[in-house]
Image: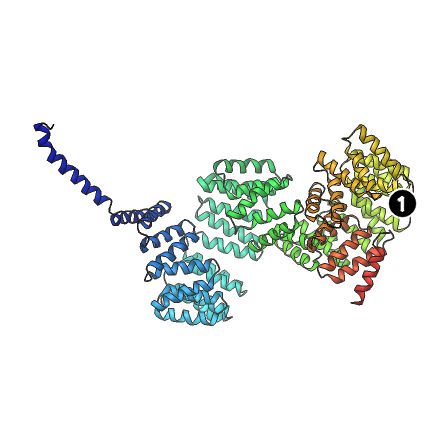
Amino acid sequence: MLTPHSRRSFPILLILALLLAALSAGCGDPEQKKQAHYEKGLEYAAKGEHRAAILEFRNAVRIDGKYADAYYQLGLAQLATGDPQNAYRDFERASSVDPANLDALLQAARILLGSNQPRESRQRVEKILAADPDHLEALILQATIHLLEGEADQAAVVVARAIELHPDLDRLHLLQAQIHTTRRQPAAAEAAFKRALALPPANIGKHQALAGFYLSQQEEEKAEAQLRQSIAAFPDSPQPHLDLAALYAGRDQMEQAEASIKQAIALAPKDPGLLLNLGNFYRGRGLFDQAESAYRDALALATGEAALDIKATLADLHFERNRREEAEQLAGEVLAANGRHGLALQVRAKLLVAEGKNQEALTILNGLVRDYPRWGEPFSTKALAHFNRGEMELSHTAVEEAVRLAPRDAQARTLLAQHLFQKREIAGAKNEAIIALRLRPNNFRAAIILGRSFLHNREYQEALELFTRMNELLPDNLEVLHHLGLTHLARRENESAAAIFSRILKQRPDFTPALGSLVAIRLQSRDLAGAIALAEAQLAEAPDHLDYLLLLGELHIANQDFERAVGVLRRGQELAPEELRTYLLIAQIQSKTGRTTEAIAEYRALLAQQPGQIPARMQLGILLDQQGDQAGAKEAYREILSRSPRFAPAANNLAWKLAGEQKPDLGEALRLALLAKEQAPEDPHIADTLGWVHYLRGSHDLAVRQFGQAVAGLPENPTIRYHLALALRAVGKITEAKGELRRALELPAEFAEREAAREMLAGWEKE
């Protein structure tokens, strides 16, 4: 029951409720809501808060899916945040809902052209011009598309029409200058550049464009004069001085370049970017102390993200100087502040590669190449990591991308030269090595590849001149000295070669290639006793040197002194149980002396007592293999891998056995061969196995690389040269394939494929 008071209050409460309902209904009106979101988005965009603007514009189009203006503004905001893909989608929706929105259509056309879709971009430009034939931006875009598509004449017609409509627009004259340059009309191009320069607004970019044109025409004096005009026109700007410094550096006038950079710094002494530029200049010249000083001065002035960038650059310099602890410390400081900092991550990846942690590095690098697809250096480091893991195809692909993105990256050029050399593409290897040396004249590795290319092509005089010059510059570098010795050896100047190899061994008694070359000279003279004496004397200087033990063991085998050979090889096996060659040589001796069955019984008895004896089981597997017990050999190798999954000799031999089966499991063979390769990247037997698996899989380029490495390590092994010949033939290098077959047949060592090689060579000669 209502009280008198409640009766009087009821109408008032009802009126208030109805009023609130009316207000709520008004606030909930979709038209008003979408407009509110749209206007809020415009406010955010005007303040540069584009991500907040995106949220508001999205709310607007959720309310009204045909709100063309909101779609257009959403596209602009997406562009501002570096998201052209979503921006394109929104511009397309805006123009679809409102065909009169030519600006949306234009933005979509620009994005399409930027993503290398000129045909689709052209279609949208034509729609704009059909609606508005005098649309300036559409005419400019149409001319640009013609120019990019090689249609310079059509581009000239379009720009001429645009200039008729807007004769005082400087950028039209700049575009016309580009078209004249493409059409090889330098006088007309120069005139167009000058017209643009005379028109407002005044800006440095137009001076840069004209100077760049002069440089492209090899008119360096005019370019310099133009840059000096720029300095006069903008006396307070550091930029023209930096431009002049770049010109001087390109002409190798380094003192003038340095002075120009310092003049730029004098105009803006508090600008850390200018000091960073100076540091980069010094670093490019190899003046690392000066570079470090400039970077530290820049760091003292910088704040925020700029300071992190400079600190990461300094870390990268430390890495280049092989000061890895300092590089790691600085990179770590940057990453602690910004865990996604690109250069700091790149430095961390390079450190991991240097430590042999290639897979960890690749985890970082894969993220970098995804996030920075146009930055060349991560691709270069990625290529090196794959190279170290024996993943040559992945490495080659990555380094080609690095060179495409950063054609002046000397390290990438050098690695590409290495790949081409391994593939026996000697002309390409020479070219890349020469470019790398031009970019960095002190590029040691590129010079070595160039010299090796000369040797491979029998250009002995060129090789002699190069390695002689390198030896003058680096008199204590044993690798250079060794290649100089090899050059004399190739020229049949054995005395000069022997003197160089002896000199190397006096400086470094454990330098294997020098002893190997000296022994080869003795063997060419049929002085086996002298070769043995030489190896024994050198082993006394380096008693635990595995390669010397292996070499001496092989010499004793050649001398039929099997007891001494086994003793020497057993010492090697104790030093390095994972070394494949000791097992092979001991098995060879046991086979030659008719002790295979007896040795197998001894190994079985030993393993019954000590099943974890991996060297004994490895030797058992090889002997079973020699006896034709394929199943027993594979069982032995698998047992080893179950106990020691990364034991390279067992992985290698099992890979070889699997590849040789009637129905081979080449996938498993490849996995095992790659595992062995990663553990022993320099072992020529393992390179031969991996090459053979690649060959059987049809990956002939990769096979050539591995067989090439195996031949370099075992040049007197005819079977490996036979394998290399097969792979060279498969990739179309017929002349080189014939050469390898001839070398295999000339070698004195017997090999199972000799008759097949002889018949094959005869067949190839008839073709």
Query: Picture coordinates of residue 422 (x, y %)?
Result: 70, 53
Q: Is residue 80 left or right of residue 760?
A: left
Nearest to the observer: residue 199 or residue 702: 702
Q: Quadrant of residue 559?
A: top right
- Quarter of the image for the N terminus: give it: top left
Q: Is residue 31 visible?
A: yes
Query: Picture coordinates of residue 311 (x, y %)?
Result: 51, 40
Q: Is residue 285 visible?
A: no
Colour scheme shown = rainbow
Furthest residue toward front: 1
Q: Dot 1 lies on which element?
A: helix
Query: Picture coordinates of residue 564 (x, y %)?
Result: 89, 37
Q: Residue visible at 48% across and 70% down?
A: 152
Q: Quadrant of residue 354?
A: top right
Nearest to the observer: residue 605 or residue 743: 605
Q: Amino acid at mark 1?
A: Ala
Q: Quadrant of residue 122?
A: bottom left
Q: Which residue is mark 1?
A: 558
**Dot 1 crowding, Cα within 10 Å, few <14, some 14–19, many 20+:** few
